[in-house]
Image (tube, helix red, strand yellow):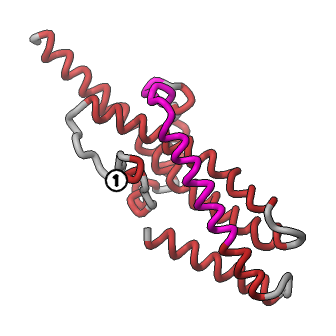
Amino acid sequence: MTLYLSVIGIAATIISAINIACNTAMWYYVIIAVIWCIALQFAADGTIAIIINKMPNRYFGVDNRHYFVSEREVRLYKRLNVRRWKDKVWELGGLGGFSKKSLAEPNSPEYIERFIIECNKGVLTHRLSYPAGFLAMLTLPNVCSLTVALPVAVVNVFLNILPTLALRYNTPMLQKALKRLKRKRELVTSGK
């Protein structure tokens, strides 16, 4: 969380300083516009998260092809070293009732399936947040929509891409674990 707030604070400072130095608007208007855009980003992201969280789990199931992670994608995540930095990504799933920071029940197929569903919900939430961040541009007049709202939206996209990558990185491993646990359960129930 500290990393995200630091990125937001640094970006807000840089955006404000450049706009004030370039005299795009009065200094107090620039600061208000930056704070306004950041607040809109949080509101849009939060609203999207609430809506997605209310949707039925069946739309985010383990076998939903919209959330399939290809081998090519897995290789990309390995090249990006997602494993090394994914735990530093801000995870707010706990606010919706399911934290994805760690596996609480690694031997429960039901829990792993729920974890995958929550990852899929998170992926959709973050993906919808990419374009939603640009809506702030409609609220600012003239040049500030380009010099304030646009850079804030770009930072928002970056901060939403990171959790998307982390969630997509984890999903194939969770699916393998789920298959293994289901096979194990079938062997136990069949008496072999």
- Identify the residue under disc 1: 101
Residue 58: say if magenta: yes
| Residue 106 relative to residue 130: left or right | left
Q: Quadrant location of the N terminus?
A: bottom left
Magenta residues? Answer: 36-63
| Residue 80 relative to residue 38: left or right | left
User: How far across and down, in percent of the image, does residue 161 sit?
Assistant: 58, 54
Tell me which amino acid carries mark 1. Answer: Lys
Q: Quadrant location of the C terminus?
A: top left
Q: Secondary structure at mark 1?
A: loop
User: How far across and down, in percent of the image, does residue 17 sit?
Assistant: 72, 86
Identify the image quadrant of residue 184: top left
| Residue 93 relative to residue 76: left or right | left
Residue name at image x 57 percent, y 78 percent: 9
User: How far across and down, in percent of the image, does residue 47 sit?
Assistant: 58, 50
Residue 7: say if magenta: no
Q: How many marks?
A: 1
Mark 1: few/some/many CA within 10 Å (<14, 14-19, 20+): some
Residue name at image x 44 percent, y 73 percent: 2
Residue name at image x 90 percent, y 70 percent: 142
